[in-house]
Image: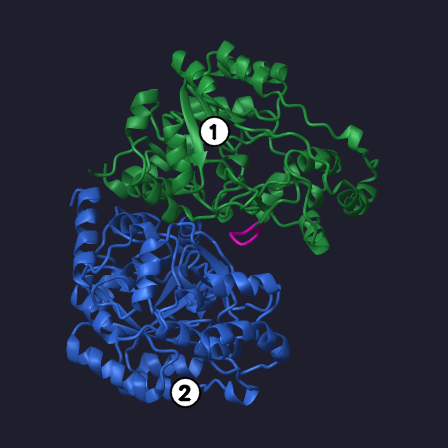
Chain colours: A blue, B green
Amino acid sequence: MSISWNTDFCKRLQIRYPIILAPMAGITNMPKLVAAVSNAGGLGTLGGAYMSPEQLRQAIQEIQSLTDAPFAVNLFAHMGKDQYEGWSKVITALQPVQQALNIPVPTPQMIVTPDHFEAQWAVLLEQRVPVISTTFGLLSDTHMQQAKSLGILMIGTATTVEEAIQVEQNGCDAVVAQGSEAGGHRGTFDTQTKPLGSNIGTMALVPQVVDHVRIPVLAAGGIMDGRGLVASLALGAQGVQMGTRFLTSAESGAHEVYKQALLNSTEDSTVITTAFSGRPARGITNTFIRNWNATGMQPLAFPTQNTLTRDIRNAAASQHNSEYMALWAGQGTRLLTDKQSAADIVEEMMATARTLLQR
Amino acid sequence: MSISWNTDFCKRLQIRYPIILAPMAGITNMPKLVAAVSNAGGLGTLGGAYMSPEQLRQAIQEIQSLTDAPFAVNLFAHMGKDQYEGWSKVITALQPVQQALNIPVPTPQMIVTPDHFEAQWAVLLEQRVPVISTTFGLLSDTHMQQAKSLGILMIGTATTVEEAIQVEQNGCDAVVAQGSEAGGHRGTFDTQTKPLGSNIGTMALVPQVVDHVRIPVLAAGGIMDGRGLVASLALGAQGVQMGTRFLTSAESGAHEVYKQALLNSTEDSTVITTAFSGRPARGITNTFIRNWNATGMQPLAFPTQNTLTRDIRNAAASQHNSEYMALWAGQGTRLLTDKQSAADIVEEMMATARTLLQR
């Protein structure tokens, strides 16, 4: 079958273009960007994992006020319980950072991660969000059935063929095949046996996943423009999920120093690190990562390390110091454009696709 | 411009298809496979780096006896001088392996790597090979001028945009953009500051390289079939370089247990290791790599570690023991086919390309 961008995934969702905004939890003002991508004919995704139920409801209502088009909300399938094993060593290692940023050293009692999942889930059902995507594993049959009974389209995230097969067996309607180029957290299910996650390049991962599942596959990782879109469709994907490209868009609420770090970076600026959250994620190398690696230490488990470093990341942001922020980014940052609107990015991608495919 | 497989690179070389057999030094009976790919309309490449000048001349003459079509020969731009720093620790770490394989423990005097480069180079000029490709850096202006004065087409290998720019400035006619999915040695120039090399996924690397050089870019890494070919052309490449896919072909001289390990592997079976050669390379994880990693040691520098482990790899091969062989492989091994002829592989890829592009 010849390459087409009007894929079954697009038809099912009644969206014009197979371009999905990746969930980016922790970026402010996301509803505006989510709605902009959906209004442009793609599918915006709200990264809701770190939001309180009330914040999540407000964000969803804001998106609904900005667009009538479908959008998605992403949650972590498993937030996990706090674990404090190794606390004293980690705290000792982080003290120079807290001193540099002039913030207090926390006690374990101060680092408690709320597990809002059930309450967040209830909000998604209550608000009848059109699409729910998940990362870090699978949802229970009960949750899957609740979503399906309301006609919500479910998308899982996989970093290997085996994970993709599990996503399909779990009942998801589509699966994101997340290649190693992708910025931010790896979707890898089991980071106990694979501390840095599975890191298969998009070019290799997508066709192997396509050959092993029947549900639509959405390619993620290193896709930055219309060339990457057509390449992904050629590999058998029915759409692309892109995060980094939209981080420097006009509607992005990413911090200004984060945007500058992205625009100043190259394809070789990032590493996969567990230093910020305890889970493997790709970000631009900075002082925080270099110093942490120099200690040779293991971080606390997710989500505790993530909660522990939040004050550091927030203080660094308020001090405009990108050396201690989590600068999540993929490997395609030379292709970033500054302050381009999401609609322009989507239309430019489709214009390139039409030229490449003579349509 | 719309996607076409009849690229300027094909026209310049007068080859039918933009499919290049990757150089695979150390695989026996390569002339047959090289000629098979060239006869199929692609461009075969002989991995000549480890051959003596006489072996190289014989291999080239065998290829010439099997095809009138263009072919390439690959050499390492820099073999490097032997370095024995850390010898006693490395020898101690390897002794259990030598015992397991029942082979003697060598002395430093026994581990001497000949640098055949100048003599190899003379053979390539004497034999007027149509194409020369290099890895591990750049050739001197003198060598480049000698090749160009004979009308030899020169191809360099890059793993980053900066390396690709240097390859173009060096005077090469084309550059291989080697993505992180690729099997075997990383082409990274400077492995002193980057012990594991630069590992940018093909999907991200190719378009960024294409945007920064004027010479044709050849995509490598995770490309296994016609889908990968069309994807690479969409990214702006003028051809693809594929190694792993041809290792299990009918004409491949790869060891039987190596072929079985490839066919039994998945997209997640490989790692980047310096254990076998001192340079980073992607291969299937086995006992040798696991045990080496457990020591936490640094290998000797390339080429000394490579020469030191040759007896181990050769003994393992003769004992049909893949646990101590270098099982170089990319991340696309679920897409391997067993005993398919090189001509079938090439024709199947082009048939897929015609279908995807409606040509």
Magenta segment, which residues? B265-270
Residue at image coords 36%, 82%? A51
* The one of A273 and A93 positioned closer to us in this rendering: A93
> Secondary structure beneath disc 2?
helix
Across and down, in percent, residue A344 comes to: 16, 58
> Which quadrant holds residue B160?
top left
* The one of A169 and B332 positioned closer to us in this rendering: B332
**Prevailing SS of the magenta stretch:** loop
Residue at image coords 45%, 74%? A101
Q: Nearer the viewer, mark 1 or mark 2?
A: 1
Identify the subunit bearing mark 2.
Answer: A
Indicate the amino acid at tag 1. Answer: Leu
**Residue A143, numbered label:** none
Identify the subunit bearing mark 1.
Answer: B
- Residues marked 1 and 2, same chain: no
Is B346 placed above or below A221 here?
Answer: above
Most distant residue in the top direction: B126
Residue at image coords 34%, 80%? A147
Across and down, in percent, residue B233 comes to: 31, 39
Residue pointed to by mark 1: B138
Residue pointed to by mark 2: A118
Mark 1 crowd level (few <14, some 14–19, many ≥20, 10 Å Cα):
many
Asked if residue A1 lies left or right of residue A276, the reply is left
- Whether tag 1 and tag 2 are in contact, CB under 8 A, the answer is no
**Which quarter of the rendering shows the C terminus of chain B?**
top left
